Image (cartoon, grey):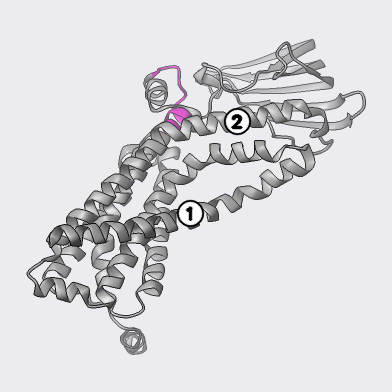
C-alpha cells in the first residue's frame, strides 16, 4: 500500500515539477530575450547561434528555477491531496504525516542534485561559453557597434568612450577607456586618437591608441602615471586558462577556492568570489528546505488547491530570494561573512518548515490573526 502511495506522490510531484520548471525558466529567459533579439537584428546573428547562446544561459537559470519549481510542485500536490480529503483517508488508514515524507524527500534529493550539478558544473561552463560566443560575434563586427558619445561596454571588463568615431576608417578621437579585466590592477586610459583593428588571432580585437596616458592603480594605494606616444591594447577572446581575467561567475569551484586563498587577490574581489562560491551550494540545498516547508503549507488548504499553491509559492519565493539577495549584497560589501550570509535563508526557512511540520503532524495549524482582528486592534490602539 505504501509503495503505491509513494509512487503516486512521486509521479504527481515529478509532473508538476517539470511543468513549473518550464514556466519559471521561460519567465527568466524572457528578461534576456530583448538583448538576444537585438543581437539578431543589429548584428545579424544567426538563429542557430542564438539557440546555442540560450543553451549556455540555461544552467544559470536552472540554479534558481529548480528550487522554485520543486516548491510549487510539492505545494500543489499536497494542496490537492488535502482538498480532496485524501490526507484524511491516509490518516484513517494509519499512515501518519511522517510516513508520507520519504517520497517528498527523495524528490527533493533529486532536485538538489540537479541544482548542484547545474551550479557547480553548468554555471561556469555556460558563462564561459556564452562570453566566448558573444565575443566572437562582437569581434566580427566590432566597428559597427561603437557609437560616439556613448559608453560602449560590450566587451566584459572594458568601458570605452569616444568623442568622435569614423565608421569608414575605424578611427577614434577623444578616447577614454576603463579597463578592469584585471581587478587587482584597474587601468584608466586617455588618448587623443585611436584605431580599431584586428589582432593576430581572428577572434581578438586590437586598439591602437596615440598620444595619451595610462593611470594605473595597484595594491596598497600604489598609483602610476605613464605617458605614451602609441599604445597597442590587445583584447583577447575569453575562454583561456588565466583566471585573473575571468569573472567569478565564469570560474569553477576549484578556481574560486584557489583565488580566494591567494594573497594576491584583492579583498573586495575575494568577498565577491566567496559569495559566488557559497551561492552555488546554498541554492541547490533550498530544494531540501522547501520539501520540509511545502508539505505543511500545502496541508493548510481545504479549498482551491491550485490558486492557494500558486499564491503561497510566490510569497515564499519572494521572501526567500529577497532575504538571499539582501544578505548576498551585504556579504559582497564585507558587512557579513559570506558562508553565514548565504546559508541564513536556508536555516531560517528550514526551522520554519520544521515548526509547521510538527504542528501539522499534531493536527494543529499555525493560527494567524484575521483581517477583522487586525483592523480591530488598529482601531483600539491610540
| x then y, percent, for residue 177 | 72, 26
Note whether residue 320 is visible. Answer: no
The mark tally for this picture is 2
Note whether residue 358 is visible. Answer: yes
Q: Secondary structure at mark 1?
A: helix
Q: Nearer the viewer, residue 143 or 25?
A: 25
Q: Residues within 10 Å of mark 2 (few under 14, many from 20)?
A: some
Q: Nearer the viewer, residue 237 or 162?
A: 237
The residues colored magenta run 262-273
Q: Which residue lies at the image location 19% right of the left edge and 72% below the top edge?
A: 87
Q: Mark 1 and mark 2 in contact (Cβ < 8 Å)?
A: no
Question: In this image, 208 relative to 358: left or right?
Answer: right
Q: Which mark is residue 261?
A: none
Report if residue 258 lies within the magenta region: no
| x then y, percent, for residue 233 | 72, 16
Q: Residues within 10 Å of mark 1 (few under 14, many from 20)?
A: some
Q: Earlier in the sequence, mark 2 or mark 1?
A: 1
Residue under pointer 1? 22
Q: Nearer the viewer, mark 2 or mark 1?
A: 1
Question: In this image, 285 relative to 95: left or right?
Answer: right
Q: Secondary structure at mark 2?
A: helix
Quadrant location of the N terminus in the rendered image: bottom left
Relative to 202, say whether 71 is above or below: below
- Mark 2 vs mark 1, CA separation in Å: 24 Å
Q: Which residue lies at the image location 63% right of the left edge and 30% below the top edge?
A: 133
Residue under pointer 2? 131
Amino acid at each position: 500500500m505504501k509503495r503505491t502511495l509513494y509512487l503516486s506522490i512521486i509521479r504527481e510531484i515529478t509532473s508538476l515539477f517539470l511543468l513549473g520548471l518550464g514556466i519559471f525558466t521561460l519567465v527568466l529567459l524572457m528578461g534576456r530575450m530583448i538583448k538576444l533579439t537585438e543581437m539578431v537584428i543589429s548584428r545579424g546573428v544567426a538563429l542557430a547561434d542564438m539557440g546555442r547562446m540560450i543553451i549556455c544561459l540555461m544552467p544559470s537559470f536552472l540554479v534558481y528555477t529548480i528550487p522554485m519549481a520543486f516548491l510549487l510542485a510539492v505545494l500543489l500536490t499536497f494542496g490537492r491531496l488535502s482538498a480532496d480529503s485524501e490526507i484524511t483517508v491516509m490518516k484513517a488508514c494509519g499512515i501518519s504525516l511522517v510516513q508520507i515524507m520519504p517520497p517528498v524527500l527523495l524528490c527533493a534529493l533529486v532536485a538538489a542534485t540537479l541544482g548542484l550539478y547545474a551550479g557547480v558544473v553548468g554555471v561556469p561552463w555556460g558563462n564561459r561559453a556564452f562570453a566566448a560566443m558573444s565575443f566572437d560575434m562582437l569581434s566580427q563586427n566590432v566597428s559597427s557597434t561603437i557609437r560616439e558619445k556613448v559608453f560602449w561596454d560590450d566587451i566584459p571588463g572594458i568601458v570605452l568612450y569616444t568623442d568622435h568615431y569614423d565608421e569608414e576608417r575605424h578611427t577614434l578621437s577623444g578616447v577614454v577607456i576603463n579597463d578592469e579585466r584585471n581587478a587587482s590592477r584597474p587601468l584608466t586610459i586617455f588618448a587623443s586618437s585611436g584605431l580599431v583593428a584586428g589582432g593576430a588571432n581572428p577572434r581578438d580585437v586590437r586598439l591602437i591608441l596615440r598620444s595619451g596616458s595610462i593611470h594605473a592603480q595597484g595594491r596598497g594605494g600604489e598609483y602610476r602615471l605613464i605617458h605614451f606616444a602609441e599604445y597597442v591594447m590587445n583584447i583577447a577572446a575569453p575562454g583561456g586558462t588565466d583566471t585573473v581575467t575571468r569573472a567569478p561567475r565564469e570560474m569553477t569551484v576549484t578556481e574560486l577556492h584557489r583565488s580566494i586563498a591567494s594573497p594576491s587577490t584583492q579583498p573586495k574581489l575575494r568577498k565577491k568570489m566567496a559569495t559566488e562560491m557559497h551561492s552555488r551550494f546554498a541554492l541547490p540545498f533550498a530544494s531540501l528546505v522547501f520539501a520540509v516547508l511545502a508539505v505543511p503549507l500545502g496541508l493548510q488548504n481545504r479549498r482551491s488547491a491550485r490558486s492557494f499553491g500558486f499564491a503561497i509559492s510566490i510569497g515564499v519565493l519572494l521572501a526567500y530570494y529577497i532575504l538571499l539577495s539582501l544578505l548576498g549584497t551585504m556579504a559582497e560589501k564585507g558587512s557579513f561573512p559570506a558562508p553565514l550570509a548565504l546559508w541564513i535563508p536556508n536555516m531560517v526557512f528550514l526551522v520554519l518548515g520544521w515548526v509547521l511540520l510538527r504542528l501539522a503532524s499534531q493536527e494543529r495549524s499555525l493560527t494567524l490573526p484575521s483581517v477583522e482582528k487586525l483592523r480591530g486592534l488598529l482601531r483600539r490602539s491610540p
